[in-house]
Amino acid sequence: MNVKILVADDDYDNRTIIKQVLEAAGYQVFEAVNGLEAIETALAQTPALILMDLSMPKLNGWEAAKRIKQTPQIAGIPIFAFTAHALTGDDVKAKAAGCDDYISKPCVPREVLQKVRDYLMKE
C-alpha cells in the first residue's frame, strides 16, 4: 500500500503515536507542525487524507483547512479535524471550515486507524 496521509499536529507525542499506528498499517505518513506546513506538504505530496489539529501555531487548523479547500490542486483532499476542541458545536464549526470528519482528542489510536480505513475504503 502506498497511500499517503498527512498528520498535522504541533504536539510531537500526538503526531508520533498516530504516525506509528498508520505506518504499521502500511500507510505512508507525512508530518506538519503548523497550518502553513500542512498546506505546503499537501501541495507537495497530495495525500489521500489529512488529519488536522485545529489548534496549531503560525496558522491554525481551522484556517489551514479553509485554505486547502480553496486551493484547486488540493481542494478534494478529505480533512479530518483532529482536536481537543470537544465542545458542543465544534464538529459543526470544523465542517464549516472544510473538514470532512471530526476526531476528538484524546483518542484511541486504533480507533483513528479504523476511521481512516473506513473512510478511504468508501472513496
Image: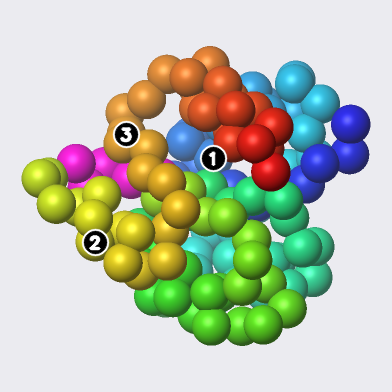
Where does the magenta region start and end? 82-86
- Please, what secondary structure does the residue beneath circle 1 have? helix
Rendered image: mark on residue 15: 1
Is 24 placed left or right of 63 in the picture?
right
Q: Which of marks 3 and 2 is nearer the N terminus?
A: 2
Q: Which of marks 1 and 3 is nearer the N terminus?
A: 1
Q: Does the magenta stretch include residue 34?
A: no
Q: Is residue 50 visible?
A: yes
Q: Where is residue 8 in the image (x, y as percent from the top left)?
A: 54, 54
Please tell me whether residue 93 is drawn above or below residue 16 in the rendered image: below
Main secondary-structure element of the magenta-colored stretch? loop
- Please, what secondary structure does the residue beneath circle 2 have? helix
Q: How crowded is mark 2: few (under 14 residues within 10 Å), some or many (20 or more)?
A: few
Q: Does the magenta stretch include residue 83?
A: yes
Residue type pointed to by label 1: Arg
- Please, what secondary structure does the residue beneath circle 3 have? loop
Residue type pointed to by label 3: Lys
- Report the mark closest to the observer, 3 or 2: 2
